[in-house]
Image (tube, grey):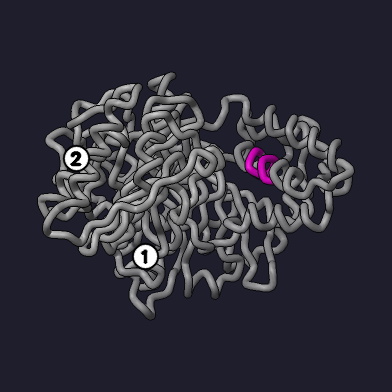
């Protein structure tokens, strides 16, 4: 593979190969006109000297058989994800791209073939654009399908961005803080070229749901082409593999209270807090209160944010909205603590913190249909947070983002826009709103599970109950039991079961 130097030697070789390509007797290949320096100066990307030397004379290659390769942003896809699109790779949405950066570099690069669906292999074809051009010309001259470059003998694997950020400071600076549905591929020292990229999307379309194929993958080149971020944009598809979650900070109770107090001071009327309880009052609560829950309740017992129904932590207000039938269907008294009741012109929704009766632990925060009949017909759950303090951090983050987006020219905040932004940011508080669906399976399939919690769930439930593990699910996530093939069309739910504070969720069908 030819590489690029920091002068014009590589450019001369590239131009010679392109000119020879245009003279091929088989014909059907045309060189597109080049660009002026003024045009390249106006591009939103830096153009190195070697690239300029080529682009002044050749702006692309047009092949009657394989289409057009465009060597600049004019007429092509606008940059913004760290690369320019050179052309398409076929009919499945694949793209041939070249990395571009703002820093002064000798060449653009790397050159990658990105296949979003995972069926075809993504490949790094070359480290630099100018050095890759003779290779492209040679393949076209030989009549090969330029989009079907054979995969490399070497492979580099993508890793979860959260793991990369924790393990490699240099890669962390490139990948940023990471998130549950983004992988990162380290392109800094590849074993050779071409090099296959090993990755797969987090979603699966193998379960034939009504909304299958709503998901897609986005690519971003960062650090001037030193790393590739692969993000799964999951919409109405089941998760195909476990995810890693960002760690909830150890000081989440204190941090949540501090952030909400700061917002209440900055946004009077838009964020309102209700004061906390005394220790004596907390001792009289009808459920056990672990230390991190007490740390919150001593400081506040209610949060009202414009655009969201009140979050009420004291006994009474929210619990009174739950019918006895609903309470029995979701575990009975003492198995959860309701914190909000949502009714937005649809069926009502109960937001609740799940409580492990055996340990007294307050676990995951979920939302479930608030109407018993609706729950029986359409059993579904949304995972909102890992804990009550985490939920408050989610609320604070949504309010802070809404305030930023609703800021006015005079430094204030437009209340109506703020409320709309909050509601949009927290739309997933309603179940089944397009977040990733956690796949569930019959409990009998967990009977021989090596995982102790899964095996315990299988032993405690009927074999035809559907079970799902939320420990390796992203937040937010949807759990739509009625979307699974094993859930018959006329099947109705007898009850939902939450084990270990909501880490395992199951639905038991009516016998």
Marks 1 and 2: which is nearer the front? Answer: 2
Q: In this view of the protein, can residue 484 be seen by the observer?
A: yes
Task: Determine the CA span between mark 1 and mark 2.
Answer: 35 Å
Question: Closest to the observer: 302 or 64?
Answer: 64
Q: How many marks?
A: 2
Q: Position of residue 271 (x, y in %)?
A: 81, 45
How far from the left and from the top, in percent, is residue 361? Answer: 54, 37
Residue 95: assigned label: none
Label 2 crowd (10 A; few <14 / some 14-19 / many >=20)? some
Of the 4 image quadrants, the one containing the N terminus is top left
Q: Residue at x 44, y 45 (%)?
A: 35
Asked whether 17 falls inside the magenta stretch, the response is no
Q: On the picture, is 384 further left or further right than 153?
A: right
**Outermost bottom residue:** 490
Helix, strand or loop for disc 2: helix
**Which of pointers 1 and 2 lies earlier in the amino acid sequence?**
2
Residue at x-position 60% and y-position 70%: 371
Residue stretch rendered in magenta on the structure: 393-398
Q: In terms of depth relative to the viewer, which is nearer, 386 or 47? A: 47
Q: Which mark is residue 213?
A: 1
Decide if residue 302 is on the left or right side of residue 430: right
- Residue at the location (59% across, 61% down)? 430
Element carrying mark 1: loop
* Label 1: how many Cα within 10 Å (few below 14, some 14–19, many 20+): some
Q: Are marks 1 and 2 in contact (CB under 8 Å)?
A: no
- Magenta-colored segment: predominant secondary structure: helix
Question: Residue 171 at what x, y percent from top left?
Answer: 41, 24
Name the spot of residue 381 as percent of width and height, x first: 50, 59
Identify whether 21 is placed above or below 184: below
Using the rendered image of the protein, determine whether residue 501 is visible from the camera's viewpoint. Answer: no
Name the residue located 41 percent from the left edge and 29 percent from the top edge: 49
Which numbered marker is on residue 135? 2
């Amino acid at each position: 593979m030819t590489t690029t130097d920091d002068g014009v030697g590589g450019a001369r070789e590239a131009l010679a190969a392109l000119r020879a390509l245009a003279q091929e007797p088989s014909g059907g290949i045309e060189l597109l006109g080049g660009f002026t320096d003024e045009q390249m100066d106006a591009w939103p990307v830096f153009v190195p000297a070697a690239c300029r030397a080529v682009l002044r004379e050749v702006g692309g290659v047009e092949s009657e058989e394989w289409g057009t390769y465009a060597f600049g942003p004019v007429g092509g896809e606008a940059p913004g994800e760290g690369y320019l699109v050179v052309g398409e790779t076929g009919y499945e949405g694949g793209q041939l791209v070249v990395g571009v950066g703002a820093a002064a570099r000798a060449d653009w690069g790397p050159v990658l073939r990105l296949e979003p669906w995972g069926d075809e292999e993504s490949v790094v074809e070359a480290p630099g654009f100018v050095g890759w051009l003779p290779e492209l010309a040679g393949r076209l001259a030989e009549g090969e399908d330029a989009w079907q470059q054979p995969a490399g003998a070497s492979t580099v694997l993508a890793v979860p961005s959260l793991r990369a950020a924790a393990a490699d400071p240099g890669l962390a600076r490139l990948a940023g803080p990471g998130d549950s549905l983004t992988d990162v591929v380290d392109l800094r020292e590849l074993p050779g070229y071409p090099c296959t990229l090993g990755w797969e999307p987090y979603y699966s379309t193998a379960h034939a749901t009504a909304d299958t194929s709503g998901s897609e993958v986005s690519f971003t080149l960062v650090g001037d082409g030193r790393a590739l971020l692969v993000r799964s944009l999951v919409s109405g598809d089941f998760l195909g593999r476990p995810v890693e979650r960002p760690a909830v900070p150890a000081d989440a109770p204190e941090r949540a209270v501090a952030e909400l107090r700061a917002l209440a001071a900055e946004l009077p009327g838009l964020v309102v807090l209700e004061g906390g309880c005394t220790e004596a009052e907390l001792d009289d609560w009808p459920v056990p209160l672990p230390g991190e829950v007490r740390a919150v309740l001593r400081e506040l017992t209610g949060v009202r944010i414009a655009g969201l129904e009140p979050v009420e932590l004291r006994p009474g207000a929210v619990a009174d909205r739950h019918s006895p039938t609903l309470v029995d269907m979701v575990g009975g008294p003492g198995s959860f603590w309701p914190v909000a009741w949502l009714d937005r012109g649809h069926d009502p929704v109960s937001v609740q913190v799940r409580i492990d009766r055996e340990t007294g632990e307050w676990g995951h925060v979920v939302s479930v249909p608030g109407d018993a009949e609706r729950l029986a017909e359409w059993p579904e759950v949304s995972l909102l947070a890992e804990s009550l303090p985490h939920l408050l951090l989610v609320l604070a983050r949504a309010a802070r983002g809404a305030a930023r987006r609703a800021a006015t020219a005079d430094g204030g905040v437009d209340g109506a826009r703020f409320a709309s932004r909050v509601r949009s940011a927290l739309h997933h508080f309603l179940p089944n709103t397009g977040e990733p669906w956690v796949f569930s399976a019959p409990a009998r399939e967990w009977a021989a599970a090596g995982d102790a919690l899964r095996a315990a769930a299988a032993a405690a439930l009927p074999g035809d109950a559907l079970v799902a593990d939320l420990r390796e699910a992203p937040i937010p996530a949807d759990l739509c039991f009625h979307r699974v093939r094993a859930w018959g069309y006329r099947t109705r739910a007898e009850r939902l079961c939450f084990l270990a504070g909501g880490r395992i969720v199951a639905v038991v069908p009516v016998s």
